[in-house]
Image (tube, grey):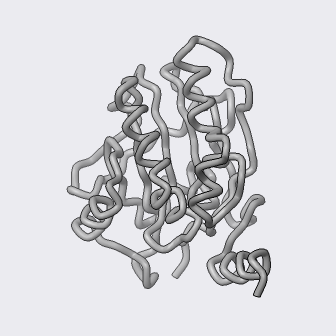
Amino acid sequence: MRRRESLLAVAGALGWTGVAHSAVAAQAVVGQKAPAFEVADASGRKRSLAEFAGKTVVLEWTSPSCPFVRAQYVSGKMQELQRWAAGKGVVWLSVLSTNPARADFLPGEKAAAFDKTRNAAPTALLMDSTGQLGRAYGARTTPHMFVIAGTGLVAYAGAIDSKATVDEAVVLRSKNLVRAALDDLLAGRKVATPKTAPYGCAVGYEA
């Protein structure tokens, strides 16, 4: 089977989508105030957007089973960006919006252990098992990325990078769109590309 056919087979099996998911209304609008939230992290601690008022915040929808997410972590690019962002004072929140009835659901302790095995370095891993946070932002895929400026406005929404791929080698050659948005924000510039189409596996809101 040729690589393109293989990719499409994997994508179809896992609910890959590069367009809006009709069941999730996009409510986090670039240029508008980011939806407030309060959700427990993997340790059970309540975390809220208000906790990080005045700081730049990245929201990363993630998954333990999605090959698009796996490629980002196997390549090392996601962890590298997380650590770079932390060094710049940026808050990075990874989000698991997985229905507890799904086979790939991980409770808090196991989710934290999984994140450790992939050498992830977010500020916190949020457990959005009800899907409330994901739906509030209109998160449709893993990964689906949002950057919130210190003003509380959504500055970027969309894909992690410029190439939809499950190949870590391609990830290494792709332009990281979140890094570009953060570079603009940290330099006091308007984000040059504030919105792109997300790609990846459909967020597992339903069982």
- Quadrant assignment, res 5: bottom right
- Residue appearing at x 77%, y 59% in the figure: 19
Q: Is residue 87 above or below residue 163?
A: above
| Left or right of 80, for residue 174 | right
Quadrant where the N terminus is found in the figure? bottom right
- Residue appearing at x 67%, y 41% in the figure: 175
In this view of the protein, which residue sits in the foreground, 125 or 2? 2
- Residue appearing at x 62%, y 66% in the figure: 166
- Quadrant assignment, res 178: top right
- How many numbered circles does the render carry? 0
At which x and y percent is residue 207? 51, 82
Q: Is residue 128 above or below residue 67?
A: above
Q: Is residue 152 above or below residue 2?
A: above
- Quadrant assignment, res 31: top right
- Residue appearing at x 69%, y 75% in the figure: 11
In this view of the protein, which residue sits in the foreground, 119 or 58? 119
| Left or right of 167, for residue 58 | left
Farthest top residue in view: 188
At which x and y percent is residue 43? 21, 56
At which x and y percent is residue 84? 41, 33
In this view of the protein, which residue sits in the foreground, 50 or 71? 71
In this view of the protein, which residue sits in the foreground, 83 or 100? 83
At which x and y percent is residue 96? 43, 61
